Amino acid sequence: MREIMKKISFVIPCYRSEHTLPRVIAEIDEKMKQMTQYEYDIFLVNDCSPDNTFGVIRALCRERENIKGINFAKNFGQHSALMAGLRYSDGDYVVCLDDDGQTPADEVDKLINKLEEGYDAVYAKYEHKQHSAFRNIGSKLNELMTRMMLEKPAELYISSYFAVRRFIVEDMIRYENSYPYVIGLVLRTTRNITNVAVNHREREEGKSGYTFKKLIGLWFNGFTAFSVKPLRIATGIGCCFAFIGFIYGIYTIIKRLINPDVPMGFSAMMSAIVFFGGMIMIMLGLIGEYIGRIYISMNNSPQYVIRERINIEPDSSNNML
């Protein structure tokens, strides 16, 4: 009786990658020729790229049935594109990587071997990152945020190149709210995660699609969707300043009783009012952010809207999530 082969599904969010995407696919194909014990398919999710990225995806899908194409109706972001690919994937292992060639597809065996050892998720770790200074700063801030808000282990390195088992994917796709954050979904499912060292290449052309605005939005997704720590921090800060204000009030009364001629100080009072007023506005804004996201989720705002699919069986339930 022939042994049933395991299957690997590759999920690649695509944006401005009409020139780099064919090389990424060719690299996957070349590597999978060596990994003959696995079947594989590739899901290419076009995040409404303004160039001819979906035209390239369409051409690739025409050549082979194991390449699947998904085209978004508008730009929803990398994490929404990942969620769409994850929902349609059916591999025993799912590998997510970038479309620009910086993540080495020919080292996917390192990630898969770690899954075979028994880990639930494996993240590629870059010893020498080739990102721009802006992206490196953003990565460090993201690292700090995930450690503080999502309780990520300090030794775990998070990247966009990772592999997970099927049961992890099944739990991740149960999340249907409007603001997906893939790292948070993995961390809430398992802590049996490890790193594996891979090379990181220089970008051959173009630039990163992450602007400062998009990075800020991504961080907000992370800590408002998967953590209430910001609210607890705001409460703690409020209690601290209330205590400081109380002590300062006692000090002011005592000083007035000891020396009635000492002026109270208009400038000091205005500084205190402005400072505490600013703190209150920050805390109210944070609470409003949570409430706003709850409101949007209650209105069933979709994670993504699919305009077109190629080599994928029609399923209306997945068109809009």
Image (tube, grey):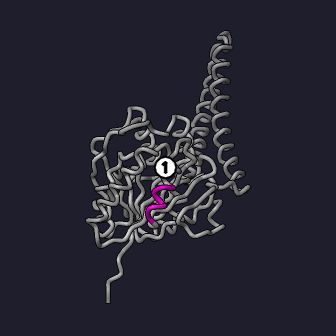
Quadrant position of residue 3? bottom left
**What residue appears at the point 41 percent right and 68 percent down from the top-left corner?**
165
Residue at (38% x, 55% y) in the render = 25
Q: Nearer the viewer, residue 314 or 213?
A: 314
> Mark 1 sits on what residue?
14
**Quarter residue 163 falls in:** bottom left
Query: Furthest residue to the bottom?
Result: 1
Q: Position of residue 183 (x, y in %)?
A: 47, 54
Q: Position of residue 213 (x, y in %)?
A: 55, 36
- From the top left corner, tell me how far across and down residue 58 is, in percent: 51, 56
Q: Is the residue 77 above or below the residue 116 in the image? A: above
**Residue that sits furthest to the top in the current view:** 261
**281 sits left or right of 223 in the view:** right
Q: Which residues are magenta?
A: 58-64
Quarter of the image for the N terminus: give it.
bottom left
Q: Which quadrant of the view contains residue 19?
A: top left
Q: Which of the two residues, 286 or 7, is positioned nearer the viewer here?
A: 7
> Main structural element of the magenta stretch: helix, strand or loop?
helix
- Dot 1: element: strand
Q: Name the residue type under label 1.
A: Cys
